[in-house]
Amino acid sequence: MSAELRQLYQEVLIDHAKRPRNFREQGAGAVTVEGYNPLCGDRIRLYVSRDDGQLRDLSFTGSGCAISTASASMMTEALKGKTAAEAEALAERFHRLVTAAVDAAVDEEGLGKLAIFAGVREFPVRVKCATLAWHSLRSALHGDAAVVSTE
Amino acid sequence: MATRAMDRALAYDVERVRRDFPVLSRTAHGKPLVYLDNAATSQKPRVVIDAIRDYYERYNSNVHRGVHTLSEEATQAFEAARAKARAFVNAERAEEIVFVRGTTEAINLVAATHGRTRVHAGDEVVISAMEHHSNIVPWQMLCDEKSARLRVIPMNDRGELDLVAYEKLLGPRTKIVALAYVANSIGTINPLREMARAAHAHGATVVVDAAQAAPHLAIDVRALDADFLALSSHKMYGPMGIGILYGKYALLDAMPPYQGGGDMILSVTFEKTTYNHVPHKFEAGTPNVADAIGFGAAIDYVTGLGLEAIAAYEHELLEYGTQALSAIPGLRLVGTARDKATILSFLVDGIHPHDLGTILDREGIAVRTGHHCAQPVMDRFGVPATARASLGLYNTKAEIDALAAGIRRAVEVFR
């Protein structure tokens, strides 16, 4: 297998894809957003519960490829307890990480495990898979449309 | 398989055929290209590419209007392509062949003209559960506009249409029956002759989407008794942007025009326009002359190889591919109709089709992943997407082996 593939499909990504964390619904108190990637058919439903400006709980359901599932799983873990502003900032950093030029140096500070998604830069058509959950998050924070599309 | 067909398959020299397609010698990610996305679009043989270049280099000109040499040559080549298309689908007259952009435009043309005059409130249009979106949406739009009803023929778990249910759907309200000849997502070949007969018994018009049939089967509109039949050049080794609508002459003649403009008129005053004859009535504006000529070259190419020989060879590939894929633990084929074209849709346990597609791509193997513009088919089988390997006349058993090996490697990654 090529080095790029190994870089993308790292153990941690496959682990999250096979055993997604926070893969569950939430009750009426949570903000719910549908994220849809019409190109691939990936579909997630993101649940965000807020408490005094903090993201108290995040979870998701749906079906998608390994990249979109792992991305959603790792996002929900990374954002728990963060403020909306912190979450926005991380979303921005994540977006820069996956859309930067392949050979560009990327500031991985604060990204933690999420830095593995740098591997998706080698696969431009898969960037949307990685960003689906994050698009949905932004929409949940802004109270935008109930269905977010990557197209 | 008949012995004669077997002999032809044996005589079929795929290595020679491959040399006719320049793109097949390239690599992808450092590996020899294994192109298995033919149902999306096929590659083009050199003769097609040459025909288009030749047109632009030697006689590019507008058709049906100039008196000069180039225009006459272009018009002759354009109409010669129409004659080739006539022979290809065994239509009675060349006037029954309308040049369009492709299958989608052809179906929209029928829905917007014949459909609008034929279908009224309370009427029904029948399609099948395995249609491509292009043979669903135009009819949905028509039904919405006319307060008509869209009925859907169900299919079984193998991906075969339920013909008993079909007969029950037909009735005095049925005005149009629109069917795929070959299903793009799962490869089923539908028994169109029988189905057309049943539709005609109720006075319905039969519209055939032959986009996926054209590269695999010998099409005979008269044997099928199709009222309309649509196909795209680019799925059958010709250029993109051109296709044909076949229509029975009397139907085409009675239909109102589709688009207004130049070439579709006999005379225009501000008070009244007299429309041109069939097929020009439906060919408003400057047509895609170069690609029509390229399409003609593609027809010559496939008929030169012989559609029977192609079908026999592809049947061998289908059997080999079905076995090779079925032998992979955790792989499930979606669509296992008894009568099938070389389209293998499948799922592998624990691997999403998109991840599989990415991994195969790095092996130089091109497959399609997703819903294949047939979301209702995915819903019917309860899957969000599949991976699809669709084979054509230049694919080989060695390429199927490469695909199987690639899938096994992907299984390792996700183990």
Image: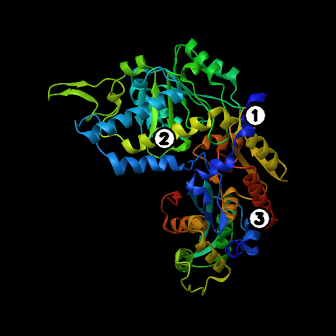
Q: Which residue position holds label 1?
A: B7
| Secondary element type, mark 1 | helix
Can I make out residue B374 in this image? yes
Where, by quadrant of the figure, is residue A42 drawn? bottom right
Q: Which residue position holds label 2?
A: B297
**In the picture shown, does residue B207 fall above or below A144?**
above
Q: Toward the viewer: B314 or A100? A: B314
Q: Describe residue A9's horizontal placement relative to residue A106 as left or right.
A: right
The label shown at residue A18 is 3
Q: Residues within 10 Å of mark 1 (few under 14, many from 20)?
A: few
- Tell me residue B253's x, y (percent): 37, 19
Mark closer to the observer (1, 3): 1
Q: Residue at x 68, y 47 (%)?
A: B14
Could you tell me which chain the residue with mark 1 belongs to? B
Q: Residue at x 76, y 46 (%)?
A: B321
**In the picture shown, does residue B346 fall above or below B130?**
below
**In the picture shown, does residue B414 fall above or below B303?**
below
Q: Describe residue B126's horizontal placement relative to residue B146 as left or right.
A: right
Circles 2, 3 touching at the beta carbon (< 8 Å)? no
Q: Residues within 10 Å of mark 2 (few under 14, many from 20)?
A: many
Q: Toward the viewer: A142 or B409? A: B409
Could you tell me which chain the residue with mark 2 belongs to? B
- Tell me residue B387's x, y (percent): 68, 52
Q: CA distance from mark 2 to mark 3?
A: 50 Å
